Image (tube, helix red, strand yellow):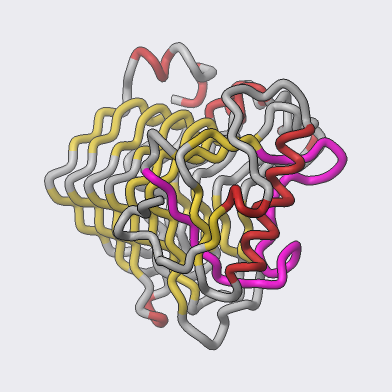
Amino acid sequence: MTLPDYVPSDAEDLPAHGAVANPDDPDDGTPSTNRSAIMDAIDAAGDEWGVYVPSGTYFFGQNDGNLWIQIGRNTNATGVSFYGDGPGASTLVVTRHTPETNIASAFLYISGQYDSTSHTVTFRGLGLNGQSDKLGDMASNNVGQIGVEVQANNSGLDLKFEDVYLQNMYNSGIRMREGSLAVNHCTFERIGIDLNLDADGSRVDHCTVPSPEASNDDTVMLENSVFKLCSGNATDPGGDGHVTIRNCWAEGLGSALVKLNSNSLTVENTYARLYSEELENNVVTSVR
């Protein structure tokens, strides 16, 4: 097997830990197996190494508990990265059998792992599909879904997304409490739409929700990326670190391209059209 040149040669192969690629999602059996395989691969990789997801569609989750894989809590290893053969080839999909009473987030990097040390977690060459349109009314049950989240007290942990397709997330695609975020050649589609529908237009969420702190030299860089059909913004930063949006295309955003907190901003060569017929047909009108 020839790995893409960006995949570390010693990355753990997901199927070697029991993961099964399947073209549909008939029951919870295979997703539960795949969730366990992902956690086994993370631990086998060890701190700050990588997991390789070969071509295929891998449904994962469980029907008897929260879905998310809490890296550093459900796993012994921390700071693990994920690589695939490309977003049209290697896809991780949240099972539609997740009960609407359970958290359906994919990956959570828990608090306090990188407060005093520096490390970059990379997601590259992958698709991540939350299937939020098949998960039921999570808003009424006070639960939700984020693609990848970094909790607080991780000021040294940065996220890098390259060539990733994030779609159908109930809440945010990416949420960070601290650290820098770099997004390059990615697509975000159908983010926060089902939250808005279930909440009758009273709630929105955003493709990316970083929290860069200038005192830590944190930045947000969104470049060469597409943001399409989101109930909120392409990015909704907290903190006060600098935000750059470069060579991006956005259409069908319920709120804005970006809503700043105390951040400085650079926008270059970027097209943003908030209205789209597709957005109008997919959200409660009051969002706009």
* Residue 179, visible in the rendered structure: yes
Residue, far left: 269
Q: Which residues are magenta?
A: 60-85
Q: Residue at x 46, y 82 (%)?
A: 118
Residue 26 point in image, percent of width and height: 72, 21
Q: Is residue 81 magenta?
A: yes
Magenta-drawn stretch, dominant element (helix, strand or loop): loop
- Residue at (42, 15) in percent of width and height: 280
Q: Specify the farthest residue to the bottom.
A: 116
- Indicate the quadrant where residue 232 lies: top left
Residue 38 point in image, percent of width and height: 65, 53
For the point 51% across and 86% down, which residue is it? Answer: 117
* Left or right for 1, reference 53: left
Q: In this orientation, which residue lies closer to the viewer: 277 or 86?
A: 86
In the picture, measured across the screen, residue 148 lies left or right of residue 97, that is left
Q: Where does residue 190 sit, x and y in percent of width and height? A: 47, 29
Using the rendered view, name the quadrant where residue 187 is placed: top left
Residue nearer the viewer, 10 or 133? 10
Name the residue rendered at 38%, 31% in the picture: 253
- Picture coordinates of residue 53, whole percent (x, y): 50, 48
| Extreme-front residue of the structure | 1
Residue 204 lies, with reference to residue 152, above or below; the image says above
Q: Is residue 130 magenta?
A: no
Q: Quadrant of the C terminus?
A: top left
Q: Is residue 33 left or right of residue 129?
A: right
Question: In this view of the protein, can residue 239 be seen by the observer?
Answer: no
